[in-house]
Image: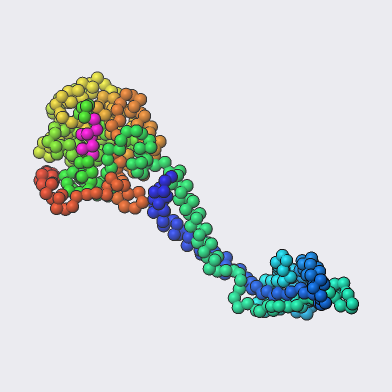
């Protein structure tokens, strides 16, 4: 993943990250509030010589102190010191438990001994620290070897412990911060793993990772398309209409050395917008004054006639079996803008009809009569109809809905076309999000209203004619 991919993950999963951080902070707050507060108190003592008459004695005594200071520090947590402290303070805890609350620290060659006590009571913590310091001084004087009737060293308190005003733990702000960071981090890991393991085609880059064929264009997602699929006429100045014009232009410059008279429009699975793409692409090509024919070759679930508000009772299947003549099955739409060959009667054997010699001859004759032929075919993975047609047409355009098909499904569909000798012209991404982290650059540019109005007068007239026809 590149840096931009991580940014997209953050943008796509920001709600999850915020919720996880809040949950982590809330959980940490509950834990912190349920903990018993503890207080730290610390006293310090110093180990010194009782007396030294000259420099030589002082030097030798300092060496001696450095050797015994750790020993005296170890005595501070022994029963010889703690038992008297327990008795004097009236503590009910055991000596072992009391020793676990005490931390003794020395600093190498320094003769200072720090006595730190952690307790649930601030006054008791200070009393224990001071009590240990006093009793340590007494115990050392009792157990140290005497010289001339007195111990050679003595322990003096240099800093008495004071009752702390605030608990040392739990540190509520720090605990909350740790909870928030932990929740955010776990959610981030989950979001990254989800993005890495997500095999759906969501962006042009995902399609380009599957095939070396180009991404011919992107069609933005619009909830209005389901009710009004003819965006080239209903909204000629809109974003979607311009995207179909861009698709038309890309096809014109795709291969100038080869004729692209007949194009199969298919997809990996159903529901990816192939029929909407086929109809609007045909209308976009017709805007260049080309003679366009659209064939509904989806003999299982035909939708072209319904999209164009035509009667689809007679069409392709009736021509193939010789029931009607071709000219009787062809219908003009939009004052002759495009010619339509509906699917006709749904047959029990669509696969056999599409691979018949009659279909081959029909397509050859239609290519002689029309400048461009757009063929709406069934999805490639459920049935093999589109693969049969792709072998006979100039090329196949794969329609892939963003977030719908997986990379594996797109690769299998393309492979199905190529295995029968068909040519995949490219991929058209549909239902691309226009907002959010996955918004594509394909769908971020559109006309200003002034330019759109001046350019689309002819399209507006055609839209008006269509509405009159519907009435």
Count the numbered circles shown: 0
| Residue 40 coordinates in the image, percent (x, y) | 65, 73
- The extreme front residue here reads 55
Foreground: 344 or 254?
Answer: 254
Closer to the camera, 5 or 145?
145
x%, y% of residue 49? Answer: 80, 75
Task: Give the image location of residue 167, x and y in percent.
Answer: 61, 73
Q: Would residue 31 appear left or right of 84 to someone viewing this image? A: left
x, y (%) of residue 1?
Answer: 43, 45
Relative to 332, residue 444 above or below: below
Above or below residue 238? Residue 272 is above
Residue ranking furthest to the top = 357
The answer to which of 332 and 217 lies nearer the viewer is: 217
Q: Image point 22% across, 34% down: which residue?
A: 253
Can the viewer see residue 60 in this picture? yes
User: Could one spot residue 354 in this view of the protein?
Assistant: no
Magenta-colored stretch includes residue 403: no
Q: How is the image coloured?
A: rainbow
163 w.r.t. 466: above or below: below
Res 143 → quadrant: bottom right
Q: Which residues are magenta?
A: 247-255
Q: Is residue 289 above or below residue 42?
A: above
User: Does 254 lie within the magenta span?
Assistant: yes
At horizontal 26% and vertical 46% (from top left) the residue drawn is: 226
Outermost residue to the right: 148
Identity of the residue drawn at 79% across and 70% down? 59
The residue shown at (41%, 56%) is 14
| Main secondary structure of the magenta stretch | helix
């Amino acid at each position: 993943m590149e840096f931009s991919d991580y940014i997209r993950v953050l943008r796509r999963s920001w709600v999850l990250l915020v919720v996880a951080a809040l949950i982590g902070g809330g959980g940490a707050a509950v834990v912190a509030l349920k903990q018993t507060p503890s207080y730290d108190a610390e006293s310090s003592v110093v180990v010194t010589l009782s007396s030294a008459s000259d420099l030589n004695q002082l030097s030798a005594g300092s060496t001696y102190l450095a050797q015994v200071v750790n020993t005296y520090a170890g005595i501070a947590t022994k029963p010889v010191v703690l038992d008297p402290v327990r008795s004097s303070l009236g503590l009910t805890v055991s000596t072992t438990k009391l020793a676990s609350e005490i931390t003794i620290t020395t600093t190498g060659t320094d003769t200072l001994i720090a006595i730190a006590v952690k307790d649930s009571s601030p006054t008791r913590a200070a009393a224990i620290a001071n009590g240990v310091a006093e009793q340590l001084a007494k115990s050392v004087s009792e157990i140290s070897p005497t010289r001339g009737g007195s111990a050679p060293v003595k322990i003096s308190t240099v800093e008495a412990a004071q009752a702390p005003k605030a608990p040392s733990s739990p540190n509520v702000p720090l605990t909350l911060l740790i909870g928030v960071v932990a929740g955010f981090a776990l959610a981030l890991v989950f979001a990254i793993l989800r993005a890495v393991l997500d095999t759906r085609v969501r962006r042009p880059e995902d399609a380009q990772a599957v095939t070396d064929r180009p991404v011919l264009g992107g069609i933005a997602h619009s909830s209005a398309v389901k009710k009004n699929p003819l965006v080239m006429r209903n909204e000629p100045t809109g974003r979607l209409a311009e995207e179909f014009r861009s698709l038309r232009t890309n096809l014109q410059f795709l291969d100038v050395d080869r004729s692209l008279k007949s194009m199969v429009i298919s997809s990996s699975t159903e529901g990816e917008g192939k029929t909407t793409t086929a109809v609007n692409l045909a209308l976009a090509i017709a805007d260049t004054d080309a003679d366009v024919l659209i064939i509904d070759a989806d003999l299982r679930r035909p939708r072209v006639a319904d999209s164009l508000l035509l009667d689809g009772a007679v069409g392709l299947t009736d021509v193939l079996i010789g029931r009607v003549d071709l000219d009787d099955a062809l219908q003009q739409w939009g004052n002759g803008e495009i010619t339509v060959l509906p699917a006709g009667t749904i047959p029990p054997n669509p696969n056999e009809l599409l691979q018949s010699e009659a279909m081959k001859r029909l397509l050859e004759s239609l290519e002689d009569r029309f400048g461009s032929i757009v063929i709406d075919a069934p999805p490639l993975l459920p049935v093999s109809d589109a693969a049969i047609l792709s072998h006979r047409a100039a090329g196949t355009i794969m329609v892939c809905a963003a977030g719908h098909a997986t990379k594996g499904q797109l690769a299998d569909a393309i492979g199905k076309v190529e295995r029968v000798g068909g040519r995949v012209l490219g991929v058209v991404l549909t239902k691309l999000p226009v907002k959010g982290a996955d918004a594509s650059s394909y769908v971020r540019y559109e006309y200003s209203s002034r330019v759109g109005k001046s350019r689309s007068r002819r399209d507006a007239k055609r839209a008006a004619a269509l509405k009159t026809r519907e009435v």
